[in-house]
Image (cartoon, rainbow, N blue to C red):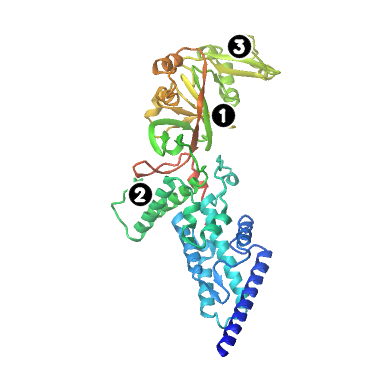
Amino acid sequence: MAVSVLIAIGGCRSAAAERKLHAALQHTLAGPPVPPADAEVWPDVQRFYALRDGQPAWVKPRSPSRRAPAALHLIRRAGDHGLVANDYGEVELAQLTEELERERRNARDLQTRLASLDVRLTAAVLAVGRDVALGRIDPRAMNLPWTKRRATPEFAAILHEIIRFDPGSWLDRIEPPHPEYAALRRVLIDLRDELEQPDPGSHASVPAGLPVEHRIRLVELNLERWRWLPDDLGDRHFIVNIPSFHLFAREQGRTVLDMRVVVGKPGTETPVFSDEMETVVFSPYWNIPDTIAIGETAPAAIRDPAYLARNNIEVLAVSGGTTRRVDPSAIDWSDPAQLEGLAFRQRPGASNALGHVKFLFPNRYNVYLHDTPADSLFNRTSRAFSHGCVRVERPEDLARYVLRGRDEWDAARIKRAMYSGQETHVRLKEEIPVHLVYFTVWVDDSGGVRFLADPYKYDRSARIPD
């Protein structure tokens, strides 16, 4: 009988403790965000507890549970992704966990403190997850020509799904899915090991005199950039890595075509974004952009009346949606009023700035891939010379690859179209994703690591917050 009474008393106390813990959790969740949660993370914290019907995730009514160390481990894993665990309160949370474990029988306001710990652990785990998945830098806030494209994972739902059986898989579930991201994480771990125990036989291709600490920072920054790419790059896609001055055609994650490219020079940088190639244009006209027309073409025509004819450039009058050719000799080049509404285009031919073919993936930057008559530039190590578009080293090979499977477009017909002098548009049957990216640490298909130059100085201006 006495035993039954004691059990009943213990059960009542336990139920009362659970009610107090639940009430304390609800009070905390109804208040302002708990560090390190910010305005973006806090709604996920609230959704997570709503999915759990308001039940704690990491503590029990009388002490931290065995899941609390698992939460701390997840926070510490931030370092594996180039982040700093203590940015998420790891040290303080570990101390609070230890204190509540020691004082669980005598602690004042135990349920309130346990509720606070539980919510703070959840906030930290979700904050780490958000930064691993989406990054800590918003390139737009730093005036960088980047477009973030990764979709936001369902953080609360994923954490709720895995917490009972496999909380350790949290970051693996939400990190960018690209093999290159995982490879860079391994490089980061190796470099940190090297920092602690220097190994002169490091496998990475490293510029002379580049300290390990600096290499670590570069890897961290390039991990961040992988978080800005879409999860699905496409089974068949192109990557142009601006710092390596190379184009890669890839299928099922493997490179099947690789060629050198020329990219935008500083001041007219090639933007970083993703889009889809839709059309190949053989023997293209070059519609000279307004910036080049105003800054280069018109002044050259004023200085030299033969400039336009020598460079095979037509003058067009654009008005009311119509376009007509204009005789350059009839234009008073000194009269700004006559220059308004004029456009310039270069006819197809050997001297055309776009060469004999261009590859269009319509975008707001008016950037595309194209041939070039300036082949000598491909012999340079650093190839940042264009006005923003990407010039390709082997345009005929690229055209054959893009039109692969189109029997009517065999190699002979492609060559004839390139040199016909008649502009011909060929719509692709299936669009091909194109990703213009900026990685100064690059992992190739064989796992080799290269540290590259920073032609646009983005590494200097886009630091991960300390």
What secondary structure is found at the residue carrying circle 1? loop
Q: Nearer the viewer, residue 317 or 91?
A: 91
Q: Is residue 461 above or below residue 407?
A: below
Residue 41, how many percent across, how many down?
60, 57
What secondary structure is found at the residue carrying circle 3? helix
1 or 3: mark nearer the eye: 1
**Can residue 82 be seen by looking at this rendering?**
no
Q: Is residue 414 left or right of residue 152?
A: left
Q: Nearer the viewer, residue 65 or 286?
A: 65
What secondary structure is found at the residue carrying circle 2? loop
Q: Type of residue at label 3?
A: Pro
Q: Is residue 99 left or right of residue 326?
A: left
The tag earlier along the polypeptide, 2 or 3, is 2
Residue at which label 3 appears:
328
Q: Quadrant of residue 328?
A: top right
Q: Residue at x 50, y 68 (%)?
A: 67
For the residues marked 1 and 3, what is the alpha-carbon distance in whole angstroms? 31 Å
Q: Quadrant of residue 115?
A: bottom right
Residue at which label 2 appears:
209
Residue 122, how many percent across, how many down?
56, 63
Q: Is residue 297 above or below residue 242?
A: above
Q: Type of residue at label 1?
A: Pro
